[in-house]
Image: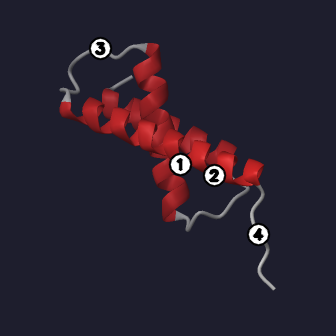
């Protein structure tokens, strides 16, 4: 028997999907800019979040390593930007 999702579970999934789309859109627009420019703290956080999601995606969406993904993404983004 298949469980039906509750309304709150549907809202959470919808919110997650829209958040991921927003992060991806920001990352795409940032990728279009040149890397020689200084980035704001918000832009840096957005780039790190996008990179962490890419790492999570490469691991097959397996949960439990979000902090490790974040630190790895932070290291990679800072290296890309020369920080």
Give the label on residue 38, or none.
3
Residue assigned mark 4: 4
Residue 50, compared with residue 40, is above or below; it is below
Residue 21, compared with residue 56, is above or below; it is above
Specify the color scheme.
Answer: secondary structure
Name the side, left or right, on which 65 lies relative to 29.
right
Of badges 1 and 4, the one in the foreground is 4
Q: Position of residue 36 (x, y in %)?
A: 20, 21
Q: CA distance from mark 2 to mark 4?
A: 14 Å
Q: Position of residue 46 (x, y in %)?
A: 45, 30
Badge 1 density bin: few <14, some 14–19, many ≥20, Cα 10 Å: few
Q: Earlier in the sequence, mark 1 or mark 4?
A: 4
Q: CA distance from mark 1 to mark 2?
A: 6 Å
Q: CA distance from mark 3 to mark 1?
A: 29 Å
Tag 1 near tag 2, CB within 8 Å = yes
Secondary element at image label 4: loop
Badge 4 density bin: few <14, some 14–19, many ≥20, Cα 10 Å: few
Residue assigned mark 1: 17
Tag 4 near tag 3, CB within 8 Å = no
Q: CA distance from mark 1 to mark 4?
A: 19 Å
Of badges 4 and 3, the one in the foreground is 4
Q: Earlier in the sequence, mark 4 or mark 3?
A: 4
Residue assigned mark 2: 13
Instruction: Please give the name of the residue rendered at 69% of the width and 59% of the height, measured from the top-left corner.
Output: 63
């Amino acid at each position: 028997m298949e469980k039906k999702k509750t309304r709150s579970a549907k809202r959470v999934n919808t919110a997650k999907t829209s958040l991921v789309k927003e992060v991806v859109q920001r990352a795409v627009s940032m990728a279009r800019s040149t890397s020689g420019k200084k980035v704001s703290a918000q832009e840096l956080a957005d780039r790190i979040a996008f990179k962490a999601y890419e790492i999570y995606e490469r691991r097959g969406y397996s949960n439990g390593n979000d902090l490790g993904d974040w630190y790895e993404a932070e290291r990679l983004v800072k290296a890309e930007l020369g920080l």
